[in-house]
Image: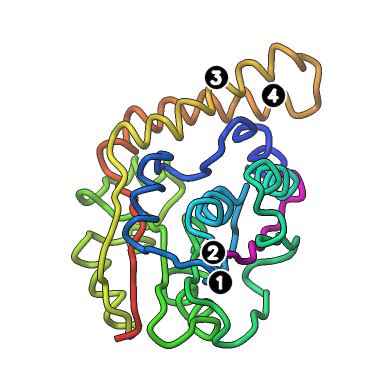
Amino acid sequence: MSLRHHEIAEARHRVMNPITEEKLRLLGEICRPRAGDRHLDLACGKGEMLASWAARYGSGGLGVDVSEVFLTAARARAAELGVADRVAFVRGDAGAYEAEPRAYDIVSCLGATWIGQGLAGTIDLLRPALRPGGLMLIGEPYWNEPAPEEALEALGMEPDDHTSLAGTLDRFEAAGMELVEMVLADGDSWDRYAAAQWLTVSDWLRDHPGHPDAADMREFADHARRTHLTYTRRYLGWGVFVLRAA
């Protein structure tokens, strides 16, 4: 799917990953940002983590994303929560963004490790910006069990794109990071992320029957429904992993 298709399908999402707002709050309780802490979020989407944590904990930070549609929503959310003076959003390629070295207490990339061509590369992107002793948050899929060829084809993945939970730990350790906490999605988390898109797309198609993107969006919804129910819920897990430099 193109970026524009994601902007349509996720138009009503506030959290743009298979993690609920409740679990995002739990993640904040785990990380315990302090007033004045700085947080860098690459591929930040609509900036819910940055804005909601700033409102709750007094932190601040910077989000980087390629979508102006998502960033407009992020800025509106920051204004709604009264934190626009502490949270900023920049449009750009998160994989090429040059952050200020050792300037952030928390660095994160949730569900977009493609910006670094995978898990290890994304850790390398985030690491220079992290202050000593700070926390790195990576949102990443993992295999609940080995996926058959038909599941890989439907999901558009290769077997080694991800690994098991234990294998994910191995990858963190190989990158010089210590896994210190995690918040994992469950079936309901996946449903809230995936199924909500079906309704959004269905409503959009009713409102835009002759739109040039209509055929693609209809195909997306049909494929997404069947793939989620047949393969995603069974084979693919997702979680946010809290890391420190080992």
Q: Secondary structure at mark 2?
A: loop
Report crowding for label 1: few under 14, some 14 to 19, many 20 or more residues within 10 A (C-alpha). Answer: many
Which residue has dot 4 on it?
215
Residue sitting at x 34%, y 78%: 244
The mark lying in front, picked from 1 and 3, is 1
Rendered location of residue 196, percent (x, y): 50, 26
Left or right: where does residue 104 sit relative to residue 62? left
Mark toward the start of the polypeptide (1 vs 3): 1
**Amino acid marked by disc 2:** Ser
Mark toward the start of the polypeptide (3 vs 4): 3
Q: CA distance from mark 3 to mark 4?
A: 16 Å
Residue sitting at x 34%, y 38%: 232
Q: CA distance from mark 2 to mark 3?
A: 34 Å
The magenta-colored residue range is: 59-69
Task: Check contact, mark 2 vs mark 3: CB within 8 A.
Answer: no
Which residue has dot 3 on it?
199
**Amino acid marked by disc 1:** Arg
Report crowding for label 3: few under 14, some 14 to 19, many 20 or more residues within 10 A (C-alpha). Answer: some
**Amino acid marked by disc 3:** Leu
Q: CA distance from mark 1 to mark 2?
A: 6 Å
Marking on residue 59: 2
Marking on residue 214: none
Mark toward the start of the polypeptide (4 vs 2): 2
Q: CA distance from mark 4 to mark 2?
A: 43 Å
| Magenta region includes residue 233 | no
Rendered location of residue 5, percent (x, y): 67, 37
